[in-house]
Amino acid sequence: MSQKPSLFTLPDGRNVFVTFALVSSLFLLWGFCNGMIDVMDKHFQEELHLTLSQSAWVQFAHYLGYFLMALPAGWLASKLGYRGGIIAGLLMVAAGGLWFIPATHIAAFWAFLLGVCLIAAGLTFLETVANPYTTVLGPKEYAATRINLAQSCNGIGWVFGPIAGAAFFYSTDSQGRSTGSETLWIPYAAVAGVVLLLAIVFWFAKVPDIKSEDSYQVEAADTALPAAPATRGALTLLWLNLVVLAASFGMIFTAIATIFDRDESHVLWIFLGSSLLTLAVLSVRFAARARHIDGHSIWAHPHFSSATLTQFFYVAAQSGIFAYFINYMTSEAPVKITNAQASQLASVGFICFLVGRFIGAGLMKKFPAHSVLGIFGVANVLMCALVFLQLGWVSVVAVFAGYFFMSIMFPTIFALGIFGLGERAKQASAYIVMAIMGGAIMPKLMGHICDVYGVSHGFIVPLVCFIVVTLYGFNWRRLSQADAVRGLAVTGGH
């Protein structure tokens, strides 16, 4: 009687749990950094007298780093392998962390935003490499389970990030005056020291470069094997990705324009104009090349091209909720809550997030990953609706429940999107990481709604985003033409 393979057993019998544990430590790192980002918003609102919409430039700088470095990170990961890509990312994170030391002396908003962007650029390398790597460290039917377990370490980091942020961003002296601007650099310098140690560990560690299975013949592009042209549906999804890409460039042009013109009333028109112009250029290029896209291209596979769209909207929802959590608690909760107390409550939210990761990973060992994603998506649509309706303590509880149901979304969308793409999964993962730019755009819109109508009504933005996630989850089988068994097990492909 054959023994059931473990989560971390390769086809040749090797157990790679130690490698998995080492890679999982990276998830803890970027969870900690992201947790501090979400506390930073309220600090700048008060220190620099910014509106909620203006403070969203923190999220923009963070996710801009992902957007700009995703493709270079994917290319370098293919050239350097998993270990080389991880070390490159760690060194860049260290550079960003150390930049906060001179940024504190410069004491300008742009200097802090540059540090946020540099750290995010380094984290892009880690996400581009580590996410697909966890999916190949064992049997493919447990790919979604492994990536959710690894991302649970992300949740642990997110729990402690707000605690560190509250301690240093909202610190006061003996007279009760804020000293946050002077001590903000300390946790980032500590992060720099830790990642430099991790880089040394990875330099000497054995990190096998495992080849993943190609279920869709995308690697056959290197041979003379013909492939069927992309379907109309696949081309439509690709064009929708170009719409998202155009919006991303539009946001970048808007950010550049605001450097020279601080009047926020012009932001919408600059964004729309630059986005539409970029979309026109991309559409012309798309029309010229559409007929040459075939099954060898990752974009010809709807389960991938729709995953990039879904990740864009999921991260948009997540970043908006995380960014304005403190604002919600201090302005909408039925009792008076201070900034420091709200930061502590943010850690409680991330504990809910972490619990959701572990429970979700367990569920996906028994139920199809796409079904769990769809059900969690429905739950979050309902949670956002309860917050929008301003139902007092019911709405407050719904915010924390939303953290629980968001927990499995990013890694599950990631695993479902790169499924069956073989070595092209490294390239595909770069595009999915690039889709994180949604977190730079939607908080700006959500912040504007919060400024005008109140924080509760701003939750209409993540509500719409979670509808997209729900649709992807329930339609993944049709998009991938694969039958899920457990986690991400399949019995067939295109």
Image (cartoon, rainbow, N blue to C red):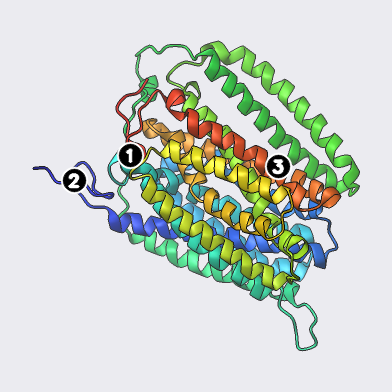
Q: Nearer the viewer, residue 123 or 165?
A: 165
- Are discs 1 and 3 less than 8 Å apart at CB? no
Would you name the residue on which mark 2 appears?
Answer: 4
Going by the numbered disc 1, the residue's amino acid type is Arg
**Disc marking residue 486:** 1
Q: Residue at x 53, y 19 (%)?
A: 234
The answer to which of marks 1 and 3 sits earlier in the sequence is: 3
Q: In the drawing, does residue 143 fall left or right of residue 343?
A: left
Residue 468, position as x, y percentages in the image: 59, 34
Element on which disc 2 rests = loop
Q: Residues within 10 Å of mark 1 (few under 14, many from 20)?
A: many
Q: Is residue 461 visible?
A: yes
Q: Residues within 10 Å of mark 3 (few under 14, many from 20)?
A: many
Q: Residues within 10 Å of mark 2 (few under 14, many from 20)?
A: few
State the CA–CA distance, disc 2 to disc 1. 14 Å
Q: In the drawing, does residue 317 fall left or right of residue 327?
A: left
- Are discs 2 and 3 less than 8 Å apart at CB? no
Q: 240 above or below 313?
A: above
State the CA–CA distance, disc 1 to disc 3. 32 Å
The answer to which of marks 2 and 1 sits earlier in the sequence is: 2
Q: Quadrant of residue 438?
A: top right
Going by the numbered disc 2, the residue's amino acid type is Lys
Element on which disc 3 rests = helix
Q: Residue furthest bottom?
A: 174
Q: Residue at x 50, y 40 (%)?
A: 375
Q: In the drawing, does residue 2 fall left or right of residue 337?
A: left
Q: Quadrant of the C terminus?
A: top left
Would you name the residue on which mark 3 appears?
Answer: 461
Q: 90 above or below 269?
A: below
Q: Is residue 65 visible?
A: no
Q: Residue furthest left?
A: 1
Q: Quadrant of the N terminus?
A: top left
